[in-house]
Amino acid sequence: MLKYKMKTFICLFSIHFLLLGISNISAQNKSQLSKGLESSMAFDQTDPLNIVTDSDLNFDDVITGQNIPLNILENLELVEVYYYGFDEKLHKGQLVIHKEVVEDIKEIFNFIKESRFPLNKVIPMSAYDWSDERSMRDNNTSAFNYRFISGTRVTSKHAYGLAIDINPLLNPYIKNEQCIPAGSTYDTTKAGTISAGSQLVREFKERGWTWGGDWKNLKDYQHFEKKLK
C-alpha cells in the first residue's frame, strides 16, 4: 500500500512539473507570438498594399509637355516621397527636384512622415499640364515647374527644381490682402498649415532654404526655395 502511495506521489509530482514546463513553454510561445505580431504589424506598415499611391510616373512622364532646356533637364531628379494624408493613411507621391537638393528633400520628408504633418497629395506638375493654378486649387504639393514668377519675366526657382510649394490651399500666396489660389485661407490652427513657429520651417532653414512666409512685401506661406552656392 505504501509502495502504491509512493508511486502515486511520484506520478503527481511528475505531472506537476510537466504542467509547469508546459506553462513556461506556453508563456514563451506567447511572448514569441507577441513579438511576431509586433514584427508583422511593423512590416505591414511598409506593405505596398497599405500605401495610397498618389503618383507613380517615370521620368519621361514628368517632363513631357514642356520645352525644357537641356542644361536644366540634366540636373533634375524624380524622387519618391512618403507622407500621411488628411485621411491619416500613408501615401506615396513624387517630386521633381534639382539633384543638389535631393538629400535635403529626403530628410525633410522623413520629418514630415514621422511627425505626421499632413499633405493632401504630391504629384509632378506635368499631371496638371504645367498649370500652377490647377495644381494649387487641387492643394497639391509640387516642386519643379519650368515657368516665370507670376506677373513677371523672371525665371522662378521652380524652373530649376530649387523650390517647393506645400499645401497651397492652406498656405496661400497673399498680396494686398488677396489670397491665391482662389478659395484659400490661412488659419494656423488647421492641420497642414505652416506658421513661423513650425518645426517644418526650422527643418528647411537648417538646410539653407528660405521661406516665403518671411517675405516683407507679400507672403507666400506655401513656398520654400534654396539658392545653391
Image (tube, rainbow, N blue to C red):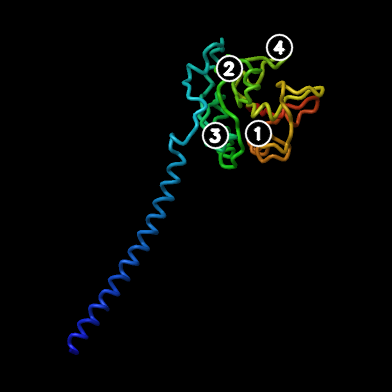
Q: Mark 3 or mark 1, which is nearer the start of the sequence?
A: 3
The residues bearing labels 2 and 3 have C-alpha atoms spaced at a distance of 24 Å
Cβ atoms at labels 4 and 1 below 8 Å apart? no
Cβ atoms at labels 1 and 3 below 8 Å apart? no
Cβ atoms at labels 2 and 1 below 8 Å apart? no
Q: Determine the secondary structure under disc 1.
A: loop
The residues bearing labels 3 and 4 have C-alpha atoms spaced at a distance of 31 Å
The residues bearing labels 4 and 1 have C-alpha atoms spaced at a distance of 26 Å
Q: Amino acid at mark 4?
A: Arg
Q: Residue 106, located in which quarter of the rendered image?
A: top right
Q: Residue at x 55, y 18 (%)?
A: 127
Say which of marks 2 and 4 sits in front: 2
- In percent of width and height, residue 157 lies at 65, 21
The residues bearing labels 2 and 4 have C-alpha atoms spaced at a distance of 22 Å
Q: Which label sits on residue 208?
A: 1
Q: Residue at x 64, y 29 (%)?
A: 166
**Closer to the camera in the image, 114 or 207:** 114
Crowd tier of the residue under label 3, counting other residues whose Cα lies within 10 Å: few below 14, some 14–19, many 20 or above: some
Q: Amino acid at mark 2?
A: Tyr
Q: Amino acid at mark 1?
A: Gly
The residues bearing labels 1 and 3 have C-alpha atoms spaced at a distance of 15 Å
Q: Which residue is mark 4?
A: 153
Crowd tier of the residue under label 2, counting other residues whose Cα lies within 10 Å: few below 14, some 14–19, many 20 or above: some
- In percent of width and height, residue 92 lies at 51, 31
- Locate the N terminus by quadrant: bottom left
Compared to 65, does 98 lie above or below?
below
**Closer to the camera in the image, 15 or 126:** 15
**Closer to the camera in the image, 14 or 92:** 14
Q: Mark 3 or mark 2, which is nearer the start of the sequence?
A: 3
Cβ atoms at labels 2 and 3 below 8 Å apart? no
Q: Which residue is mark 3?
A: 106
